[in-house]
Image (spheres, rainbow, N blue to C red):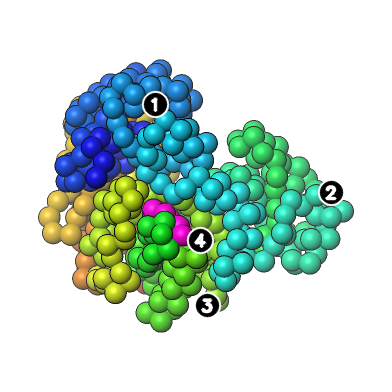
Amino acid sequence: MFDKILIANRGEIALRVLRACKELGIATVAVHSTADEDAMHVRLADESVCIGPPPAKDSYLNIPAILAACEITGADAVHPGYGFLSENARFAEILADHNVHFIGPRPEHIRLMGDKIAAKRTAKSLGIPVVPGSDGDVGSDDEARRMARDIGFPVMVKAASGGGGRGMKVVRSEAELASAVAMARSEAKAAFGDDTVYLEKYLERPRHIEIQVLGDGKGRAIHLGERDCSLQRRHQKVWEEGPSSALNTAARDAIGETVAAAMREIKYLGVGTVEFLYDDGAFHFIEMNTRIQVEHPVTEMITDIDLVLEQIRVADGNDLALTQGDVKFHGHAIECRINAENAVSFRPSPGKIIHYHPPGGLGVRVDSAVYHGYAIPPFYDSLAGKLIVHGKTRSECLMRLRRALDEFVIEGIETTLPLFRALAQEKDIIDGDYHIHWLEAFLARG
Ligand code: ADP
């Protein structure tokens, strides 16, 4: 097993990785910007190295500084968490050139799935159903028009290198197409340095259902069921749960097996998530994320499998210890992403936490790196913590969630806790009857 892992991230995910390392008896190195000197992951790690000033590009994205931290500390592997360098194939290659393991898939798979057009093409060739759309860049205005007519309006313009919901435009008629393509191109160029855009059929009321996979890079791969992440704002997940109210066992097993077989075929290494829009009983692939995801605890709670621990084991060259038969689903789990934001305007609310009391008790998990007296810096994402609740049934889970939300105290900053308290009382949520646009409609009603 690795002797020492450097965690190239911050916040709750740095702490999450650190916990897995401690349980495995692996020494840990935290890296941090000057804004994160007081961060919990820095305090709890065995060693820490300051890698630069607050802006992420100078610290958490600073590859030479992270490499130097590996050399200084003798770390033999890097866990990238999510975001930052977690889907940067070049980073994985540079680490390999310096004999440091990257805890993630092989660079070619990161690169393949990082290009959404190539990812869709690959998914299709592996027998995974995809959203109907253009096979490549939309090309000229005339070509775009022809493609859109073939697909049928409404269509969505999407960035090939997209992420975080950016560079997406819904187009309802031919008249809007050229300007939407131009806008998506310039947004994509600015955000990702790549202005390749493609078209997809725009689905009006689908659910976002994603399948968790785990592979050992040697042809063994399993699925760990699904998470329903349909409650979104600006294409960003807000509330995730599993299992999905929309699937029965047969549907879950069928899509899970299709995805696992594809992962076996490409000899996928590590954890990954294959994302679908689920509409009218049919799955449509949209993308694959080649890293641990924010919402991974939902799966951990309903399978009792530690995904980060398994991720580290397979990255170290071990065979997958689990078979598909070992994966048993029990109960229901819901995760709420509690952001340091105003619950109505969603304006970020960084600053000092003057009272902090997380909920506890049976079936309640809080993944967070904040503490009493901690000041959330303004430089990074606004995730203050995740509340994950498990119950034997969905209704027990909801009951426990309402109780846990009532208990949760975070004062000194604004948080999205009030939004979750409201959602947990809503009839459609209680009935499990929602789709990807439900939350925006709910928020618009005020
Ligand atoms: P990103 O990588 O930027 O997160 P995704 O392709 O994963 O982009 O899509 C994010 C979200 O955008 C989806 O969960 C869904 O809500 C919405 N979306 C994406 N593609 C479509 C589509 N073809 N029709 C309707 N909604 C879509």
Main SS of the magenta part reads: strand
Say which amino acid is labelled 1.
Answer: Ile
Query: Quick one: label 4, few (<14), some, or many (20+) residues within 10 Å?
Result: some
Question: Closer to the N terminus: mark 1 or mark 4?
Answer: 1
- Measure the C-alpha gap from mark 3 to mark 1: 46 Å
Q: Please state which of residues 325 and 381 is positioned toward the viewer in this rendering.
A: 325
According to the image, label 3 marks what residue? 281
Looking at the image, the residue that sits furthest to the bottom is 250
According to the image, label 1 marks what residue? 66
Identify the element where label 2 is drawn. Answer: loop
Relative to residue 443, is residue 257 depicted above or below? Answer: below
- Measure the C-alpha gap from mark 3 to mark 4: 27 Å
According to the image, label 4 marks what residue? 266
Q: Over which residues does the magenta segment extend?
A: 267-272
Say which amino acid is labelled 2.
Answer: Ser
Question: Closer to the N terminus: mark 3 or mark 4?
Answer: 4
The image position of residue 417, as x and y in percent, is 31, 46
Looking at the image, the residue that sits furthest to the right is 142
Q: Please state which of residues 72 and 299 is positioned toward the viewer in this rendering.
A: 72
Tell me if residue 1 is in the magenta stretch. Answer: no
Identify the element where label 4 is drawn. Answer: helix
Relative to residue 204, is residue 188 depicted above or below? Answer: above
